[in-house]
């Protein structure tokens, strides 16, 4: 909604749309879920951005966070990785990169999975260079895919997970799924939800090997 007036107009018109929601380890979310140091990275980037701009704020925040963190050994949809950060968007976000901004659809049946991989040689340096040059999508430290389900398995008893920015203690092995019930929201009359969901596994993907 662009303004309070838009919201009131949508309610008065009675225009309702059904949008996806997701669950991470049983906790429901509308926008994003994550684990690792992603939440810390976002908070630090937003703190720095007014003073030094978005691009440099990304690099500085990422360098600060990764300097004091260790990657988590995890299996993500059967792929063994050392995960520093993982972002799971409820729907495919744009633009490509590690600072997603907006979704074209709210009912596409997909998760936008973005991962910073700490197992690559000189991972920190390569990641910083990729951010500075705007070539993150080509970096071996970065993985992105559209998927309809995420399974995470670690040897840890529990992990700090986040659902829409709220941190909670979750299990070391968990799933991310679409919730069976859609969320009904009031929208402007001009809004038109997508008429049909993509079939599982048919969303856009930067890393088709997932």
Image (cartoon, rainbow, N blue to C red):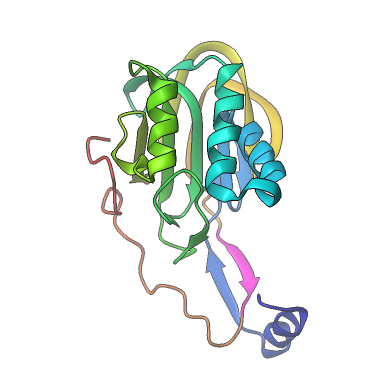
Q: How many discs appear?
A: 0
Seen as rendered, the residue at the extreme front is 52
Nearest to the observer: residue 37 or residue 151 = 37
Q: In the rendered image, which quarter is residue 131 located in?
A: top left
Q: Residue at x 44, y 66 (%)?
A: 104
Q: Residue at x 29, y 56 (%)?
A: 199
Report if residue 27 is visible in the image.
Answer: yes
Please provide percent x and percent y for residue 98: 47, 43
Q: Residue at x 31, y 60 (%)?
A: 198
Seen as rendered, the residue at the extreme left is 209
Q: Is residue 129 above or below residue 9?
A: above
Relative to 23, 2 lies left or right: right
Q: Is residue 203 above or below residue 143?
A: below
Quadrant showing the C terminus: top left
Please provide percent x and percent y for residue 164: 65, 45
Nearest to the observer: residue 104 or residue 181 = 104
Q: Is residue 46 above or below residue 101?
A: above
Please provide percent x and percent y for residue 108: 41, 60
| Magenta segment main secondary structure | strand
Give the residues drawn in magenta, as a range. 182-187
Q: Residue at x 45, y 66 (%)?
A: 105
Q: Is residue 148 above or below residue 141?
A: below
Q: In the rendered image, which quarter is residue 62 located in?
A: top right
Relative to 113, 29 lies left or right: right
Q: In the rendered image, which quarter is residue 82 located in?
A: top left
- Whether the magenta-drawn stretch holds residue 179 is answered as no
Report if residue 149 is visible in the image.
Answer: no
Please provide percent x and percent y for residue 66: 55, 22
Quadrant showing the N terminus: bottom right
């Amino acid at each position: 909604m662009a303004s309070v007036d838009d919201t009131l107009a949508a309610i008065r018109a009675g225009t309702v749309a059904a949008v996806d929601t997701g669950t991470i380890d049983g906790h429901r979310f509308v926008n994003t879920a994550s684990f690792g140091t992603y939440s810390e990275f976002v908070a630090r980037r937003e703190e720095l951005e007014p003073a030094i701009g978005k691009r440099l704020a990304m690099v500085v925040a990422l360098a600060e966070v990764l300097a004091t963190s260790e990657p988590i050994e995890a299996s993500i949809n059967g792929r063994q990785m050392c995960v520093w950060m993982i972002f799971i968007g409820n729907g495919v976000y744009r633009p490509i990169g590690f600072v997603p901004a907006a979704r074209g659809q709210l009912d596409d049946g997909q998760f936008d999975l973005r991962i910073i991989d700490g197992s690559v040689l000189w991972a920190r340096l390569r990641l910083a260079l990729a951010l500075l040059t705007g070539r993150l999508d080509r970096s071996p430290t970065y993985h992105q895919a559209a998927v309809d389900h995420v399974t995470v398995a670690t040897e840890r008893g529990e992990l700090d997970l986040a659902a829409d920015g709220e941190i909670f203690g979750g299990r070391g092995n968990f799933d991310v799924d679409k919730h069976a019930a859609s969320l009904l929201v009031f929208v402007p009359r001009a809004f038109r939800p997508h008429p049909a969901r993509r079939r599982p596994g048919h969303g856009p993907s930067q890393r088709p090997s997932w």
